[in-house]
Amino acid sequence: MKMWLFAAAVALAPASTVFAQSPNDAQIASIVVTANQVDIDAGKLAASKTSNADVKTFAQQMVTDHTGVNKQAVELVTRLKVTPEDNATSQSLKSGGDTNLTTLKGLSGAAFDKAYIDHEVAYHQQVLDAVDKVLIPSASNADLKALLVKVRPAFVAHLEHAKHVQASLGGK
Amino acid sequence: MAASRFGALLFAVGVFALAAMPRPDAASGVTHTVTMDGTTFKPASMTIKLGDAVVWTNEDPFPHTATAIAATPAFDSKPLAPGGRFTFKPAAKGDYPYKCTLHTTMRGTLHVE
């Protein structure tokens, strides 16, 4: 049930993405790496495409921060000898990220900026919900759980930053 | 002879006591450490004496800053890469609220007395 909530919340996936149980550590590792990579890819596109200074600064920070988190996550799972296990949630994340990139590539100017930032606000809120309700409670390895707890405040800061940029764009 | 041994003992105790104290700054005072860890300043609030120094160390896997919140900031580390360090030695007493300009939820205060 928890996994279903996560899949639906993060990837805005259809209800067909249903799991009967919580993710194991190998699946959590895959979800964490994929969730970061999705935001890195969107950030790279935004940084190269926007002409808005605030959006560019935010996008570049997303690339930097999430790359750093992924580097640490990969180092941890390597040390723990955990092989990230692809699963429906990580696949939904990847699919949702690809859809977002396709949408963004068809936009330009203010419409692009708004679509990118609106998605970042929603994405970070949903990832935070999943981190709190599924990933941290499900992680069994203490180091993996500690990594999730350690990076959580950065996602809160990203959400606040995204909301600030959204407001400056005249958004919600 | 006994007086000599007593002197040596006193010297040894003195050396041990000095070694156990916080690291003195080059000029005077003590150097304190604030870590940037989990997108949080630890400790978030610190009281030091005028003449002391503070070193911020970034233990997160992405950059942070320690930047005084003021029209003319008393200090600004600029982005510190993971593992980076920044030292500030206040020149005046007072409260120095500060934040990370990259993660504005991350705030701290330095009290200098």
Image (spheres, rainbow, N blue to C red):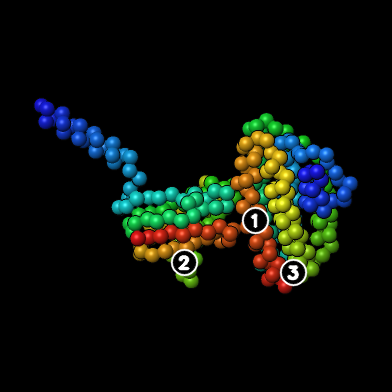
**What amino acid is found at the position of numbered circle 2 in the picture?**
Pro
Q: Is residue A47 above or below residue A171?
A: above
User: In this image, A55 relative to A94: left or right?
Assistant: left
User: Residue placed farthest to the right in the image?
Assistant: A16
- Tags 3 and 2 in contact by the CB under 8 Å rule? no
- Compute the Cα span from label 3 to label 2: 32 Å
Residue on which the image places disc 3:
A172
The secondary element bearing badge 3 is classed as: loop
Which of the 4 quarters of the picture holds residue B4?
Answer: top left
- Compute the Cα span from label 1 to label 2: 25 Å
Asked if labels 3 and 2 share a chain, the reply is no
Q: Position of residue A19 (x, y in %)?
A: 83, 41
Quarter placement of the N terminus of chain B: top left
Front one among B30 and A65:
B30
**Residue pictured at 66% horizontal, 48% vertical:** A67
**What amino acid is found at the position of numbered circle 1 in the picture?**
Val
**What amino acid is found at the position of numbered circle 3 in the picture?**
Lys
**Dot 3 falls on which chain?**
A
**Dot 2 falls on which chain?**
B
Which of the 4 quarters of the picture holds residue A147?
Answer: top right
**Residue pictured at 72% horizontal, 73% vertical:** A170
- Tags 3 and 1 in contact by the CB under 8 Å rule? no
Residue on which the image places disc 2:
B73
Q: Position of residue A68 (x, y in %)?
A: 63, 47
Which of the 4 quarters of the picture holds residue B48?
Answer: bottom left
**Residue pictured at 46% horizontal, 56% vertical:** B45
Q: Position of residue B2 (x, y in %)?
A: 12, 27
Mark 1 nearby-residue class (10 Å; few <14, some 14–19, many ≥20): some
Q: Earlier in the sequence, mark 3 or mark 1?
A: 1
Mark 3 nearby-residue class (10 Å; few <14, some 14–19, many ≥20): few
Residue on which the image places disc 1:
A156
User: In this image, A15 relative to B83: left or right?
Assistant: right
